[in-house]
Amino acid sequence: DGGITQSPKYLFRKEGQNVTLSCEQNLNHDAMYWYRQDPGQGLRLIYYSQIVNDFQKGDIAEGYSVSREKKESFPLTVTSAQKNPTAFYLCASTFRDRANYGYTFGSGTRLTVV
Amino acid sequence: AQSVTQPDIHITVSEGASLELRCNYSYGATPYLFWYVQSPGQGLQLLLKYFSGDTLVQGIKGFEAEFKRSQSSFNLRKPSVHWSDAAEYFCAAEGDSGYALNFGKGTSLLVTP
């Protein structure tokens, strides 16, 4: 079945470490997105990519980095510059023709700083 | 600035009662509108979406939403709530950032026996 796979489901980071969250889709979607979710804050956009080798900052990009070397993959790196990384991270994707296909979300990665 | 507002942080309803979750948007033009549901620790599941046409939209799990341009609203309704409907509900609208969705802060639904 087609969908978005996020891994790992749970991730623990020590202070000063960089960690990378994986997002893979087999839906042949063009655009991919990373959101951060905190209690009571809804989902906030970190980065997005509409085509391979191109990506743009969202509303809260500081302390994060991404790459889009393949259409299927959009990994997110949480760097040591992100001072409060503990959150639930969601990846999403869509076709350009999202009127017909909408958006698909992964099941999320919960990152905790230890 | 574009924004989506869900005025109710928490709502409690009795099982079998009707439900209405409110959503207002602030955009220059009518955006694409969505309602998603999220169970604890899970991703988001699309309930319904509105792009154009009929202002009453039917979704999955017995949910519907009504788009009202004059009120900039897109409220979600269900005639009879089931205990399994307890979850977090998010209203979203498509924004300018590569079609990324702007989300409201969510409404947490509690269903009592």
Image (tube, coloured by chain):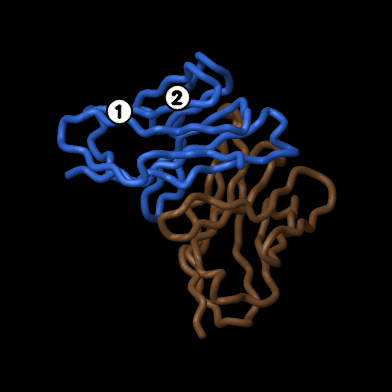
Chain colours: A blue, B brown
The percent position of residue B18, horizontal first and vertical second, equals 65, 77
Work out whether B18 lies above or below A3.
below
SS of the residue at dot 2? strand
Q: Is residue B104 above or below residue A51?
A: below
Quarter of the picture holding the N terminus of chain B? top right
* Residue occupying the point 55% across, 41% down: B102
- Subunit bearing disc 1: A
- Residue located at (65% from left, 62% from top): B76
Residue topped by disc 1: A63
Which of the pair A6/A65 is nearer the observer?
A6
Q: In the displayed orientation, state which residue is furthest to the bottom.
A: B113
Judge by depth and name the residue closer to the eye, B44 or A8.
A8
The residue that mark 2 highlights is A57
Instruction: Looking at the image, tell me whether mark 1 or mark 2 is earlier in sequence order.
Output: 2
Q: Are marks 1 and 2 on the same chain?
A: yes
Judged left or right of residue B15, residue A111 is: left
**Residue B62 higher or lower than B94, as above or below:** below
Q: x and y percent of residue A65 in the render?
A: 36, 24
Q: Residue at x 70, y 49 (%)?
A: B49
Q: Name the kind of residue labelled 1 in the image.
A: Gly
Q: Is residue A28 left or right of residue A41?
A: right
Front residue (pair B57, A59): B57
